[in-house]
Image (cartoon, helix red, strand yellow):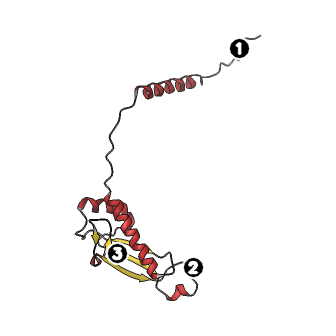
Amino acid sequence: MLHIDDNIFIQEWELSEQFTRAQGPGGQNVNKVETAVELRFEAERSPHLPPQVKARLKRLAGRRWTADGAIVILAQETRSQARNRELARERLAELIRKALAAPKRRIPTRPTLGSKRRRLAAKTQRGAVKALRGRVPANGGDGGE
């Protein structure tokens, strides 16, 4: 059983693990020992997660969310199968904890009078700079001779 918070626990039947050979360094050991862990959590079928949490979880999981509604997490950082299992379970628990927290609704605010005046002053100044970019008269324009 995977403990998420005080009221949510993920049962073992919702999780399945598959072990494969890890990529990367590890010497001869990497070629013969299956240390990488692929943890699969059947999120869509889980009775322990409310629908709104499942929706947020789907968005947070991104590419890790499969077409049949499962989350697949791959852990192959360490050379120990047991440690990789722990890492995969920790990542899943952290992902679910993030999905449990409902995002705060943004309350739209109006711009202050000062910010409106500063914006308009900046626009006026910019317009004046652009107005000075006119053509230079052909005779030199200074009339000095």
Residue neighbourhood size for the residue with mark 1, other residues' Cα within 10 Å, grouped as few (<14), some (14–19), many (≥20): few
Q: Which mark is residue 25?
A: 2
Q: Which mark is residue 142?
A: 1
Residue at the outermost left position: 47
- The residue at 44%/26% (across/down) is 114
Amino acid identity at mark 1: Asp
- The residue at 54%/87% (across/down) is 29
Q: Which x, y percent locates residue 52? A: 26, 58
In terms of secondary structure, where does tag 2 sit? loop
Q: Which mark is residue 40?
A: 3
Whole-Å distance between the Cαs marked 3 and 2? 25 Å
Which comes before the other along the chain, label 2 or label 1? 2
Q: Looking at the image, which is closer to me, 36 or 138?
A: 36
Total marks placed: 3
- The residue at 26%/68% (across/down) is 44
Q: Which x, y percent locates residue 30? A: 53, 84
In terms of secondary structure, where does tag 3 sit? strand
Specify the quadrant that holds the C terminus.
Answer: top right
The mark lying in front, picked from 1 and 3, is 3
